[in-house]
Image (cartoon, helix red, strand yellow):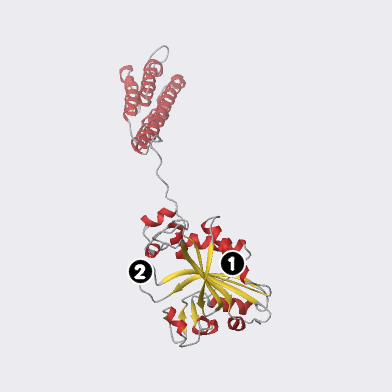
């Protein structure tokens, strides 16, 4: 049985009880013969039936109510302080004394029946509204869930974190240095005086005559050494660098570098080789190998270029590695004695090794990407491949 049918059944059951018991007991059945009050007098038995008709009409009106506001109106009209049923209760005092008890009991019974019908109808309306709201807001649980799109690290950020973690496991500490640097720290203290040909190796953004946007992370070496000298030092210096270059598949005006510096009394060139071999195997695979070629950097002596086996052909030779089997990875060398002096160390007592690598280049090598510009275009179609 539905909600409406059940409530209507209850309401009409009330009507039957009002007709057969309450009203007939009040209005002339058995020994009770009190009449219905009209004005200041009680009418005949025929007129008494108006009360029974009222009870029936009130129940029918209640069954037709469908909205909470209409239900409230019905309550005030029939059961409220100034309602019709209250008027009948007040009229009991006009009955003869011997009939008042039976009259009041019968009217109270009618009131109880209408109260019960009211509560039942109120519950039914609330259930109807709840059912309608649930139908309007229902969720089909048989449908597959909507995909949750979670964020992730940019491939450059992920590689930078991986590089730092790898060197931290080898005992290096992370040291950050300013991106806007003095010309003296960025060049002169690194054995690159003004008008030196080595300055032609990179085009620099000058903020003023003596202030630049750093073109490499190497000036961090000077700041780290001056902070920790004469104690042994083992740090990496990650950060952004800037160069005035054409934007091409192989170059950008900004890029990330990670510089490494190790200074101590027993540092040797073989330490540099061991550190870089371990790093290459951690990033590119356990079977990776490195190759060192002689090179030139003004702040290291001797200087080398470090290559790894081609990640595409595994050293067999291909178009990417120009059929050499090797790909350039980074530059490194022993710290130049003049740089050690500028950093506050005595080159007669300590030696140092340094290396620097481009983070974007690591990403290009690992994922075999042929255009560095993809890493700075913020194209989600490209970036979501790495999440």
Q: Who's the residue at 62% across and 83% down the image?
A: 341
Q: Tag 1's secondary structure?
A: helix
Q: Viewed as shown, does residue 107 lie left or right of 169?
A: left
Q: Viewed as shown, does residue 346 lie left or right of 326?
A: right
Q: Who's the residue at 60% across and 69% down the image?
A: 272
Q: Which mark is residue 343?
A: none
* Image quarter of the N terminus: top left
Q: Nearer the viewer, residue 120 or 55?
A: 120
| Number of marks drawn | 2
In this rendering, which labeled residue sits more in front, label 1 or label 2?
1
Which badge, 1 or 2, comes first in the chain's sequence?
2
Q: Viewed as shown, does residue 242 lie left or right of 50?
A: right
Q: Tag 2's secondary structure?
A: loop
Assess disc 1: are there few (<14), some (14-19) or many (≥20) residues with their C-alpha within 10 Å of its C-alpha.
Answer: some
Q: Who's the residue at 43% across and 74% down the image?
A: 242
* Residue 358 visible, this angle: no
| Residue 246, horizontal then vertical, whole percent | 35, 73
| Residue 384, horizontal then vertical, whole percent | 40, 54
Q: Nearer the viewer, residue 154 or 101?
A: 154
Residue corresponding to mark 2: 248
| Residue 375, horizontal then vertical, whole percent | 40, 63
Q: Who's the residue at 39% across and 43% down the image?
A: 146
Assess disc 2: are there few (<14), some (14-19) or many (≥20) residues with their C-alpha within 10 Å of its C-alpha.
Answer: few
Residue corresponding to mark 1: 273
Residue 53 to residue 299: above or below:
above
| Residue 128, horizontal then vertical, whole percent | 37, 32
């Amino acid at each position: 049985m539905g909600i409406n049918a059940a409530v209507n059944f209850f309401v009409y059951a009330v009507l039957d009880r009002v007709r057969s018991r309450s009203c007939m007991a009040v209005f002339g059945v058995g020994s009770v013969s009190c009449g219905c009050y009209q004005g200041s007098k009680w009418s005949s038995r025929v007129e008494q039936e108006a009360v029974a008709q009222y009870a029936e009409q009130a129940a029918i009106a209640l069954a037709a109510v469908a909205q909470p506001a209409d239900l409230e109106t019905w309550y005030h009209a029939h059961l409220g302080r100034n309602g019709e049923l209250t008027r009948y209760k007040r009229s009991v005092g006009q009955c003869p004394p011997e009939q008042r008890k039976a009259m009041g009991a019968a009217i109270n019974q009618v009131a109880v029946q209408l109260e019960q019908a009211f509560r039942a109808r109120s519950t039914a309306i609330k259930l109807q509204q709840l059912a309608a709201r649930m139908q309007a807001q229902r969720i089909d649980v048989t449908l597959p869930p909507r995909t949750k799109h979670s964020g992730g690290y940019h491939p450059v950020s992920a590689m930078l974190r991986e590089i730092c973690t790898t060197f931290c496991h080898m005992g290096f500490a992370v040291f950050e240095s300013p991106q806007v640097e003095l010309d003296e720290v960025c060049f002169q203290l690194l054995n690159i005086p003004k008008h030196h040909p080595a300055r032609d190796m990179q085009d620099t953004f000058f903020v003023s005559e003596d202030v630049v946007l750093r073109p490499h992370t190497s000036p961090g070496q000077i700041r780290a050494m001056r902070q920790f000298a004469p104690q042994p030092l083992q740090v990496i210096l990650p950060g952004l660098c800037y160069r005035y270059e054409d934007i091409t598949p192989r170059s950008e005006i900004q890029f990330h570098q990670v510089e490494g510096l190790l200074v101590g009394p027993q540092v040797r060139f073989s330490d540099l080789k061991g550190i870089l071999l371990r790093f290459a195997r951690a990033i590119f695979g356990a079977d990776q190998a490195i190759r060192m070629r002689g090179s030139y950097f003004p702040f290291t002596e001797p200087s080398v270029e470090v290559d790894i086996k081609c990640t595409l052909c595994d050293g067999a030779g291909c178009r990417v590695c120009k059929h050499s089997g090797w790909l350039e990875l980074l530059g490194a060398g022993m710290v130049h004695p003049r740089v050690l002096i500028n950093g506050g160390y005595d080159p007669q007592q300590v030696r140092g090794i340094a290396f620097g690598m481009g983070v974007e280049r690591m990403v290009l090598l690992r994922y075999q990407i042929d255009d560095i510009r993809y890493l700075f275009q913020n194209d989600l179609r490209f970036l979501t491949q790495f999440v």
